[in-house]
Amino acid sequence: MAKKRPQTTKAAKPQVNDGEIPVVGAREPCPCGSGRRYKACHGRTAAHAVTELVQRPFEGLPGECDWVALRELVPAATVPLTLKDGLPDGVPSVTLATVLPMAWPALRRDDGSILLALQNDTSSGDLSRGLADALQQALEAAPGTPVAARRVGADGPRLQDLLAADAPFEPVVHSGFEFWVPDAENATAEVTASLERANDAAIPTSLLSSVDAAYWCETPEKNHLRWVMPHPEEKLLDALARLHAAGETSLGEGTRLVGSFRAHGLVVPVWDLPSAMTAEECEKPAAEFAERLAGALASDAPLTAEERRARGGLTNRQVTLS
């Protein structure tokens, strides 16, 4: 005769709301009381929230197109940032930089000023949230301290929460990374070596002044113009197709619209330029192209057969960077 199993009283599960569940180790029991490991319970939701990709992380920020360009195209540039609540005591300035030595996410300099690196990867699928976390760390760091990379929470602020929405965003493109070390003579050997490597790898780049978010760059074989545009993708591709079919995408003799790539939710048309064509020589043809593009964007007429073929060619040459 089988023995009866002793009756046990199940322990009451803790009454914890989802918003109050703390983060614990992945293999530890979930604090919600489910009996499962954290990674298989509420940790799964938290991990998904952290890694879920935000397609347009800079949307709503002043200069969204330039944010994308500095993230993907420009080797060395800085931009002064304006905080929504003003600068705290002991922080004379906050500056966005494309990259920092040793891939630091941010740096609190000896004088208390802050450099925030844009081209670093983060553990979050939302670049804006990852950058905001690095900025907050820097604001709390001691002067002379770099910020270390860390896991970013899913509920932290984004740049849109920290930066003033009405402040200008005006990039300054540099020929090298000397802005890292205002006092080069006292830089450590490690920083000096990092500076030399970065300068050797930097591609000469200039920001055009006649149009927004268009960047000329020089390479050994040919030069390029890469122009980040804010228009909806389908509308922009239609407009480019109209101009391409009409032979109006050129920026002058020897130039050619070779395609585009998609980065952080925006489209970036790319032109090949003759190796002798300087940034200054791009200014007038770029401004004239912007006028032609505005007219093409305003058209709602169906694409002709030739324009559809042109659009297909542009779409086939499009690459997604992020």
Image (cartoon, rainbow, N blue to C red):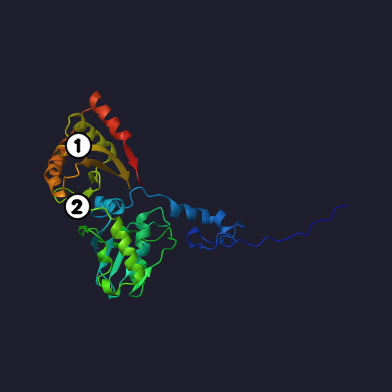
Label 2 environment density (alpha carbons within 10 Å; few <14, some 14–19, many ≥20): many
Contact check, label 2 and label 1, Cβ < 8 Å:
no
Q: Nearer the viewer, residue 190 or 159?
A: 190
Report, in whole angstroms, how far the alpha carbon at label 2 lies from the one at label 1: 24 Å
Q: Residue 278: percent from the left, percent from the top?
A: 16, 48
Residue at 19 percent across and 52 percent down: it is: 207
Q: Amino acid at mark 1?
A: Leu
Residue with the mark numbered 2: 207
Q: Is residue 295 above or below residue 87?
A: above
Residue 166 is situated, as x and y percent measured from the top left of the image, at 21, 58
Q: Which residue is mark 1?
A: 297
Residue 292 seen in render: yes
| Amino acid at pointer 2 | Leu
Give coordinates of residue 321: x percent, y percent. 35, 45
> Which mark, by number, is residue 132?
none
Q: Residue at x 84, y 55 (%)?
A: 3
The kind of secondary structure element at disc 1 is helix
Q: Left or right of 148: which side holds 288?
A: left
